[in-house]
Image (tube, rainbow, N blue to C red):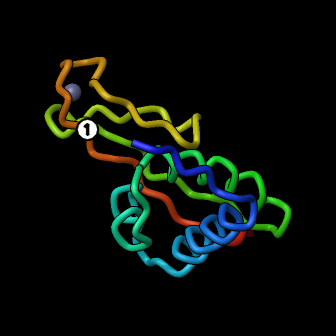
Amino acid sequence: MTEVIATDEQMTTRRKSIAELLEKSEHPMTAHDICSILDIESRSIVYEDIGHIAKSVKNSGKEVLIRPASCGKCGYVFSSRKVASRPSKCPKCRSQWILLPGYLIRSKR
Ligand SMILES: [Zn+2]
């Protein structure tokens, strides 16, 4: 498999599309949703982009809101302190059924 190295311009365009999507959406969007809508090949790209977006939207008076990831089995809610986190296992019941975190962008009041 060859690694595709994106240019800065492509990355900016992709982050812009993600940011627009999160601004327009009425419901929190998961990395999975974002991948399928924008045809992005890997969720880890989305998590990385959201980390960058969270920093850059602050300059325009907006913020990334996070619906934290939770355990599908016992309902344990993961800490959302880390913006782009993707837990793999529940610390409480060890289940790997993790409901992905969701993201939205809204103006700060
Ligand atoms: Zn659990």
- In the rendered image, residue 18, in percent from the top left (x then y), is placed at 56, 68
In the image, 17 versus 72, the foreground residue is 17
Ligand 1 sits in quadrant: top left
Q: For residue 98, what is the image quadrant?
A: top left
- In the rendered image, residue 84, in percent from the top left (x then y), is placed at 54, 42
In the image, 78 versus 84, the foreground residue is 84
In the displayed structure, 42 sits above or below 7; it is above
Q: Going by the image, does 22 lie left or right of 8? A: left
Mark 1 nearby-residue class (10 Å; few <14, some 14–19, many ≥20): many
Residue drawn at x 17%, y 25% is 95
In the image, 70 versus 7, the foreground residue is 7
Secondary structure beneath label 1? strand
Q: Residue furthest right?
A: 59
Residue type indicated by callout 1: Ile
- In the rendered image, residue 33, in percent from the top left (x then y), is placed at 35, 64
- In the rendered image, residue 104, in percent from the top left (x then y), is placed at 53, 65
Residue drawn at x 51%, y 49% is 45
The C terminus appears in which quarter of the rendering? bottom right
Residue drawn at x 39%, y 57% is 30
From the image, tell me which residue sits under label 1. Answer: 98
